[in-house]
Image: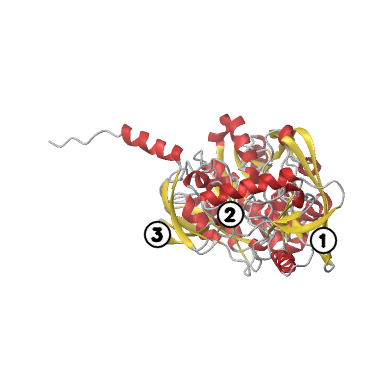
Amino acid sequence: MRSFVVLLMCLGSAPALLAGEPTAADQVIKVAREDNQVMDHLDYLVNNIGARLTGSDNDIKACEWAKAEFEKWGLSNAKLEEAGSFPVEFNRGPWHGKMTAPEELKLEFGTPAWSAGTRGAVSGKAMLAPTSLEGVKAEDYKGAWILNSRQAGRRGRAAQQQGREVQNFLRDAGVAGFISASRGKYITIGGRSPRSFDDLPTVPRITLLQTQWNKIKEHIDAGKEVELTFDIRNHFEEGPAVYYNATAEIPGTDLADECVIIGGHIDSWDGATGTTDNGCGVAVAMEAARLLMEAGVRPRRTIKFQLWSGEEQGLLGSRAWIDRNPDQLEKISGVFVYDGGPNAIAAINSTREMEPDFRKVFAPVMELDKDMPFRIDVSDQLSSGAGSDHASFLQKGIPGFFWTQEGRADWRHGIHTQFDTYDLAIPEYMKHSATVVALAALGVANLDKKLSRENIRTGRGGGGGGRRMGVFLDGVTVDELVPDGVAAKAGVKSGDIFLSIDGAKIENRRGLVRAIAGGEARKKVKLRRGAKEVEVLFEWAEELKKKKEAEKKKKPTIIL
């Protein structure tokens, strides 16, 4: 029997096991229980390196660190792959603000990525933005900090045009900067890279905690002079600002030319340290790699670990990898992406065709922890569900999975906000999730065949939610629009609130994401705009075109 085992190993197949010997999954679980290091990875990533805006120094530093860790653990082919570049590099330094009159108050605020900063501390009086330019003198506003109206994005088209004219006038007048109120307690960070180094923003745009914005306005309304000081160290450098994907692999044996991909995005917004989104996912993927190496597994298929940059700007890293590796797409069995924050992995979506294989793959997970049960959610079709890098693969007909996560953490509290710091992570959830991902990678790698590709919904153009619509969301409220996106073309405005899609009521962000991801490529959308309700039509032109072409190809039915 022993000589037979040696023969199999020499042939490159998975090693046989004597009766009663621990399986490879048992070995992974043993290592995970005795020496789980997922929180160490997260600690270094978010507390030592920090926020990782795509193309920033920290983004590159994080990729270099991940590559070095992969090499240290003995993974093969660890490297950085260039995924793209921006014309301008942006790095955020410290930021401080305070009200010095009529009272002392430390201000809590943020600025968008790629936003102008100040040249040292800049003091000036706070003033309300004028509603029109009639009778307005430029010299009256020079050096002032301008409070933007909270209703500015919710007015009619003519009023919005007038608002832009006022903003341009004030900018040219030499104001110190513009201050908008946050929505509630959350200061949401987004932003877009300038088109060129000659097109840099010149005036800071600040999002101030809503309660503090209200206090400043109350002082102004009461006739009191308000003095504000801001020191915002935002730094630009001429590009190209290159961003990378960090990748490595555990080579397979008899099916080495096929692969399983374990991934997550390594970039983050930079209003905090990027723990929920997506430091947790990076730490889990990396620990899954370490656990498999430490357990000494020899999978049949190659297991690839891919940490993509540019996810927040539209799944840029994963799309770049797909575009540059067309010959590998047919060889991928499945792609598993962790991007759901600090809660524990609780389920995986599956088609009916995949279910028998998933029952085998996740058998060890079912018994892993009675306090964190696991299930397989079976449906007729596999679609993106949430907008992350798995959607890039689904678009190509490759099985892509976004883990369902459950637990006591409120993932909304951290995602893209000033609260997204290390303390949000829950160690027992993180350790459990890393173990689940390692077992999933091993199980799918060792299946006799690749996962079924039947009933995969393709053509979603980058997943559901904000990216699919071309908006940045604050809950179900439109915070910012991407020029030429589906929402902008439909006439959606900043500040609009989603009420329903194709008649289905929208109650939360998750429901909105699901409604956008599913169904037809033309949707009736009802919004609240100020006191009014408006209806617009969302159309995904490329999908409509494909559908029309497919219908043309159908042979006509001949009735005799």
Q: Which residue is mark 1?
A: 227
In what element is the residue under mark 2?
helix
Classify the position of the N terminus by image quarter: top right
> Pointer 3 and pointer 1: residues touching (CB < 8 Å)?
no
Report the number of numbered marks.
3
| Residue 560 seen from this side | yes
Disc 3 or disc 1, which is closer to the eye?
1
Q: Residue at x 45, y 56 (%)?
A: 534
The quarter holding residue 114 reads top right
Disc 3/disc 2 C-alpha distance (Å): 25 Å
Q: Which amino acid is tagged 3?
A: Gly
Residue 162, image x and y in percent?
A: 58, 48
Q: Say which of 524 and 369 sits in front.
A: 524
Q: Say which of 396 and 334 sits in front.
A: 396
Q: Residue 347's mark?
A: none
Q: Residue 153's mark?
A: 2
Residue 47, image x and y in percent?
A: 82, 54
Residue 300, image x and y in percent?
A: 61, 41
Q: Which residue is mark 3?
A: 503
